[in-house]
Structure formats: C-alpha cells, structure tokens
C-alpha cells in the first residue's frame, strides 16, 4: 500500500524517518509564504512580534511552529522532528492542533519523527520509512517488530518488563492510566 492510500484511510499517520524543515533561514518571517500571517502565527502558538524577525534568529521550537504555519493551508500537512525541537507543553499543544486540523478541516497529517512517543495520542498508524520505501507498518505501539527499527519508549519498555512472566498491566501509553493500573494490580 502506498503512503497516500494509508493517509486517506487514517487521516493522521506517524512515519519513523528523518525530517528537515525547508524554511529559508535567511528570510524574515513576513517574507515567508504564509496566508493570513497573524492568524497563522496565533494558531501555532506564536504572536505577531515574530513578523519582523529572521528565521535563523528563532529557536528550534519557534522554527518548528513556523514550519507548521507555512503549511496550514495545504491539504496534506507534513511536519516533523517534534521530539527534538518542542518541549512537552508545546508538543501537547501541537498534537491537539494537528488533531483539530484533521477532524474539523479534513487536513491529512503526516508526522515524521525518530521517537515513537511523539505519536502517542496522535496517530493510529505508524510507518517505518527508509529511502522512500515502506519497511514496516503497524497500528500497535506494543508491536515488537516495530522496535527493530526504532528505540522503544520507556513506558512501553516498563510495561513489557512487568508483563514478561504473566500479564499484570494493560497496554497503556498514557502515564496516568499506567499509574491507575499499577494501583489496581497491587490492591
């Protein structure tokens, strides 16, 4: 199956691969091709003070948000490297924004990253891509074959370790649900 077909079926997909934004770092933010600049900046969590700044003077987090702002009008939004550029709060905000864009505006979203935990509560399908070839695809975060290509997140590693002899904990990717599950299993 091609990525475009998978994207049409799922709406938001996660791709294990490398991503580099294509912003022209020598331009000013106002010179970038962004429709309705003030609203786009506000939507991604930036304010209008960024309009007269050079892209290269912005932090990686701000560049990632700006990269998303340049793509808001596209039918297919490709964004990536979120784990290395955004803090937890910004990542959570961007995830909610991407889900809203998918649900309310029917945008197709491709999130490219090398860390699986970025896809938690965002994607239902994970694809491992190398040299434009799909090596593996899954819908299960607890799929052992997925972790032949990428590092296993700590929460999944912990649950697999606890469940190695017999199943005591459910397969949760939410830390709060895991804590509740641990509490239930010991009481």
Image (cartoon, rainbow, N blue to C red):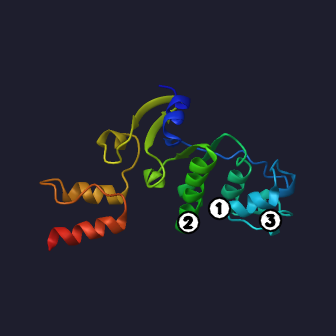
The spot of residue 85 in percent (x, y) is 59, 59
Say few, some or many: other residues with alpha carbon within 10 Å of mark 3 (under 14 / 14 to 19 / 20 or more).
Answer: some
Residue holding disc 1:
61
Tell whether 10 sits left or right of 39: left
Please tell me which residue is depicted at 86% across the width and 63% down the height of the picture: 52
Please tell me which residue is depicted at 24% across the width and 54% down the height of the picture: 160
Tell whether 96 sits left or right of 152: right
Which of marks 1 and 2 precedes in the sequence?
Answer: 1
Please tell me which residue is depicted at 83% across the width and 52% down the height of the picture: 26
Which quadrant would residue 63 be assigned to in this image?
A: bottom right
The spot of residue 62 in percent (x, y) is 69, 62
Residue holding disc 2:
87
In the rendered image, is residue 72 in sight?
yes
The spot of residue 103 in percent (x, y) is 56, 49
Residue holding disc 3:
50
Please tell me which residue is depicted at 36% across the width and 48% down the height of the picture: 141
In the rendered image, is residue 132 in sight?
no
Q: Which mark is residue 79?
A: none
The spot of residue 129 in percent (x, y) is 49, 35
Q: Nearer the viewer, mark 1 or mark 3?
A: 3
SS for callout 2? loop
Which of marks 3 and 2 precedes in the sequence?
Answer: 3
Task: Confirm or deny contact between disc 2 and disc 1 (CB under 8 A).
Answer: yes
Task: Confirm or deny contact between disc 1 and disc 3 (CB under 8 A).
Answer: no
**Between marks 1 and 3, how big is the CA–CA gap?**
13 Å
Which of marks 3 and 1 precedes in the sequence?
Answer: 3
Tell whether 146 sits left or right of 7: left
SS for callout 1? helix
**Between marks 2 and 3, how big is the CA–CA gap?**
19 Å
Nearer the observer, 153 or 107: 107
Residue with the most extreme top position? 1
**Between marks 2 and 1, how big is the CA–CA gap?**
8 Å
């Amino acid at each position: 199956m091609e990525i475009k077909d998978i994207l049409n079926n799922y709406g938001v997909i996660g791709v294990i691969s490398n991503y580099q934004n294509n912003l022209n770092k020598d331009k000013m933010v106002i010179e970038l091709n962004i429709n309705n600049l003030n609203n786009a900046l506000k939507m991604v969590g930036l304010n209008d003070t960024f309009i007269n700044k050079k892209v290269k003077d912005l932090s990686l987090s701000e560049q990632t948000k700006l990269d998303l702002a340049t793509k808001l009008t596209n039918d297919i939004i490709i964004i990536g490297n979120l784990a290395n550029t955004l803090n937890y709060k910004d990542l959570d905000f961007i995830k909610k924004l991407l889900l809203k864009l998918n649900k309310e505006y029917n945008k197709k979203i491709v999130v490219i990253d090398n860390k699986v935990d970025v896809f938690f509560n965002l994607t239902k399908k994970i694809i491992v891509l190398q040299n434009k070839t799909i090596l593996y695809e899954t819908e299960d975060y607890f799929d052992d074959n997925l972790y032949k290509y990428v590092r296993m997140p700590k929460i999944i590693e912990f649950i697999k370790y606890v469940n190695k002899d017999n199943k005591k904990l459910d397969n949760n990717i939410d830390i709060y649900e895991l804590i509740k599950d641990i509490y239930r299993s010991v009481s």
